[in-house]
Structure formats: structure tokens, C-alpha cells
Amino acid sequence: MRILLVKTSSLGDVIHTLPAVTDAARALPGIRFDWVVEEAFAEIPAWHPAVERVIPVALRRWRKHPFASATRMEWKAFRAALGTTSYDFVLDAQGLIKSAWLAVKAHAPVHGLGFRSAREPLASLAYAHRHTVPWGRHGVRRVRELFAASFGYPLPEDAGGEDDGASHADASAYGLDRARIPAIAGVADTAGDALRLVFLHGTTWPAKHWPENYWRELARLAVRAGWDIRLPWGSGEEHERAQRIAKGIDRVRVLPRLPLAGLVAELIAATACVAVDTGLGHLAAALDVPALSLFGPTNPALTGAWGHRQRRFATDFPCAPCLRKTCPLRSSAAATLGAPAPPFALDAPCFTRVTPARVWEILGSMR
């Protein structure tokens, strides 16, 4: 059976799809997937042995210059790539209008989420087969339910409950084959050697950022206990933040800008990671690297890092999770709602409940 899978972005959503691909490969031996994915994440599907071919798209880039000759040529090449293979059916695992638009280009029956299940309900009008998957569940479970309904096999027992989706996680559920990742050839886990902690500090929403003062205090606690700290970054803003976090603290190193495979090598070599709600935290989970993820305005039960060596520390602030990209409250409001007023302004006052001391305590319990 040959399936075209459409799941283009984001990094976390792509990684959340991997356990469903593993489920299908276990339930239907011999099944092969071609995967349509945004070019920035094209390396990841290729690391799964059930994925035969990765077909990159560049919707994020194309929409900036939709009428450019380069865009037209790349779109033509994408259409040609779809036309080289006959598929049993197409599975749109994203549920967006843009993903449905891509899915129908393969000229095969399309499975996808139903009107009340899709993130953009109108996308379901493009599907020949629509499946109901309830909201209020972890992203990994929702994709696994969609796959199970589309292929007609029972949902695996390790799919997780509605509370967090991770309590019964199978260490092999993501299915990544490390032999397919050239950048980590010869990289060994260092859990028994030097203690190395990676800070995954970059994220998209302003309200999801853990305060820099907190990162610095956590770095001091870790260094005093004999740990080395590594700070990756992916943009100029993240680079500046990493430099501020590392400034004046021994054994804290800001890494050079790394491609995705280079970041994988750093994660594999880490004893543990601390992450905000970010795609790289999900990547650590997929690689089975112990990680503690910190949540303020977002809900870990829906989007938290999923895996048996993953821990989530969510604030108990009165208004969390609010799912706001920016917070209308500031330090003074935080004190009004019962949180200790920090000595600096916060984009998300809810993180006053997620202190470096408590994060360090939880990290110690993970080893």
C-alpha cells in the first residue's frame, strides 16, 4: 500500500505525526508513505523507515512571491513529483485549507478530518472520506486516531489518555532510525559521562518565553552542581538572548548556528534538556532525550512534549492556560492575583509560579 501523507508544518506538528506513522507500519506491514512537508522540516520524515520519499513544499516562501518565475517553476516541479506515483489514497493529517489544496493535487481519494474536527472546517469539503476525532486531546493522540480511522485498525493501547497523552508512551513510538541521521554518526549519549544540559529557550509567542533572569539563575544552579550548559539559537533575536543568558557564567556556551541535523547531534549528546513550549522540545522527545518543558499560557495536556522521559511543569496561575500570544497582565497585576511580584517586567506573569529553584528540583528527580 502506498499513501501520500500531507503534514507540512509546524515542527511540533510534524513530529506529532511520527507515532501515527509507526502505528500504521506496525498494523499494516509493507505500507509505504510519501510525505509532503515544508522544506524547513524535510529532514525529519526521512528519518522514519516507513517513509519512502519526502516531497518538500515551500508554501511559506512561495506566498511571499506568488507570481515570481522561481515560484512557478518550483510549483511545477512539485506537481510533477506527485504525478510520478499512483497512490492508494491521500491522508491530509493537517486539516487546513492549504493542506487540503495540496492533497487534492495527487488525484487520489483523500482522507481527512471531518467538519467539526478540522482546525479549518472548510478543508473537509475536499475530502472523500471524513473522520471524526474529538477535540480536547493531545495532538499526538488526535493524529493517531485519524490514522486508525483512515486505515481501519484499532488504536494502540499506548496512545495515552485524554489527560496528557504521555503516561503510557512507548519509547519506540516515534520510530526514528538514528542510522538515517548522518549528523549523529558516532555521537554517543553522555548520561554516564559529563553532565550536559541544553536550554531550548527559543519559541514563537512572546508569552511563552521563560524570563531571561530565570534562565540565568537556572544556569548558575546547574553549573554549581557540575553541569555544562549549551544554548542553541535559530535567529538573531535568539542569538542575542543566548548571549545575555550566558554572559559572565562559566561553563555556559552559546553554540554556533546549526542546521536541524546539527541540533539533533547536540540533543543526542545531552544528559537532559529544559525547554519552553517549542518545536525543539518535541524533537528532544522524539529522540528520547530526557526533557523538562515549561508551560505558562499554553496547555501541556494538548501540546506538551510526548514521551516516557518527558516531564511538564505548568504554572498554576489563576488565568492559565489562557492561550494568548501576548499577556495583558504585567508584574503589578501578577501581584494582585496572588503571585510574588518579580523584580523585572514579565511578558507572561504566570511564569512567576515556574521558578528556577523548582525547575532545578524537578530536573534532579529525573536523573
Image (tube, helix red, strand yellow):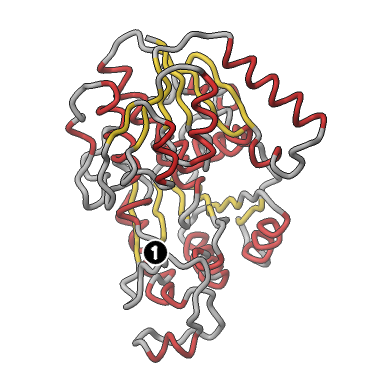
Nearer to the camera, 365 or 122: 122
Q: Residues within 10 Å of mark 1 (few under 14, many from 20)?
A: some
Quadrant in the rendering for residue 301: bottom left
Is residue 192 found left or right of 66 in the rendered image? left
Question: Looking at the picture, which amino acid does disc 1 mark?
Answer: Val
Is residue 289 found left or right of 237 in the rendered image? left
Q: Which quadrant of the rendered structure holds the N terminus?
A: top left
Question: Can see residue 192?
Answer: no
| Up/down of 185 relative to 324, above or below | above
Residue indicated by mark 1: 359
Nearer to the camera, 154 or 88: 88
Nearer to the camera, 78 or 229: 78
Quadrant in the rendering for residue 5: top left
| Up/down of 195 relative to 86, above or below | below
| Up/down of 172 relative to 252, above or below | above
Question: Can see residue 273?
Answer: yes
Which residue is at 74% across, 38% downward?
66
Is residue 85 found left or right of 310 in the rendered image? right
The x and y percentages for residue 2 are 42, 11
